[in-house]
Amino acid sequence: MSDSKVRVAVIGVGHLGQHHARIYSEMPGVELVAVVDTADARRREVGGRLKVQAQADYRPLLGAVDAVSVAVPTYLHHEIARAFLLAGTDVLVEKPMTRTVDEADDLVRAATGRVLQVGHSERYNAAVQALADLVVAPGFIEVHRMGPFPGRGADVDVVLDLMIHDLDIILTLVKSPVTGVTAVGVPVVSGRVDIANARLEFASGCVANITASRVTGERLRKIRVFQRDTYFVLDYASQELHLFKPTPVEGSGGRSQLTRVDIPVTRSEPLRQELADFVESVRTRRPPLVPGEAGREAVHVAAQIMERLSG
């Protein structure tokens, strides 16, 4: 395949899927074959804008393309991703991977011999990648991901809608089993939990405190990671990363003060990096940065949080 174009389709071209289609249409060595959406106006608009075939049913594409992005509502992820995997097609399924751990396990099994990537795009945030290179032994992590109600994503609660991003990143940073979970949450607008706080305890001794809200006027997307003699502050939106460390104060008799160090980050479009990683995995058969197993682990922890919320 390295000498031919990778033939891709995008299933679901709503808020996020349309950007998958746009980026694929711009990528060298990729042919965007079709976009699929059950909403007539949406698929015609995106298909017309990108000058590709637009259709309402994904099934004629089974076995007819090399790879697909699945960007439909979460309850359809398992059904559609599984159908393409079993047809021999490589799949990038948007986050959350699935609604349940059983569905995620089933997709991992179905992906034998195929590429299965999960769309945790924050992993491709340049600041997150710089942070991952610097964190050694986190002891405490604090996350806030908050914003106004978007009017979409309400088919799942805020844990699977927003918090799932940070669960994936925290699991990557800590690299230790979760040993304890507590959580509180409140439904405000959607009839599902719209604001939630979770506390995760790890075997390493690390504790993570995560707040996610889709009913807050202020937009805030930050993670703070504390480890011995150092802590980091990362702004997801601006892709800025700062390190704080104690430095001696001259003439103070041993007293220290915190000094900020700005970590250089070359900003990029995370979704574009994610899709480039997927296409390269399709070409070379190497595992992607976020394989199905990683998506499954994030869903597993999210399920534990939702169990505490419902209990």
Image: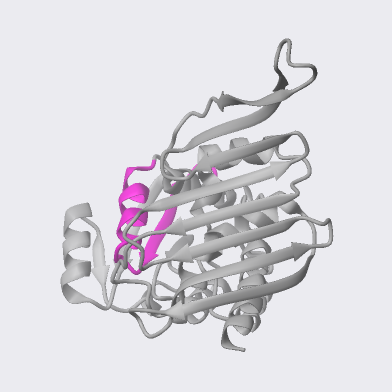
The answer to whether any part of residue 201 appears in the image is yes
The scheme the figure's colours follow is one colour
The answer to whether any part of residue 90 appears in the image is no
Image quadrant occupied by the C terminus: bottom right
Q: Tell how many labels.
A: 0
Provide the residue span drawn in magenta.
1-27
Above or below for 269 versus 288: above
Residue nearest the viewer, comparing 87 with 146: 146
Residue at the image point whose x is 32% and y is 71% from the top = 152
Q: Check if residue 3 falls in the magenta segment.
A: yes
Residue 209 locus on image (x, y percent): 62, 60
Residue 225 locus on image (x, y percent): 65, 45
Residue at the image point whose x is 22% and y is 53% from the top = 50
Horizontal relation, residue 114 to residue 256: left or right: left
Above or below for 12 versus 254: below
Above or below for 237 versus 69: above
Residue at the image point whose x is 84% and y is 61% from the top = 203
Horizontal relation, residue 222 to residue 141: left or right: left
Residue 92 locus on image (x, y percent): 51, 62
Q: Check if residue 207 falls in the magenta segment.
A: no
Residue 31 locus on image (x, y percent): 37, 51
Residue at the image point whose x is 71% and y is 21% from the top = 247
Residue nearest the viewer, comparing 287 with 55: 287
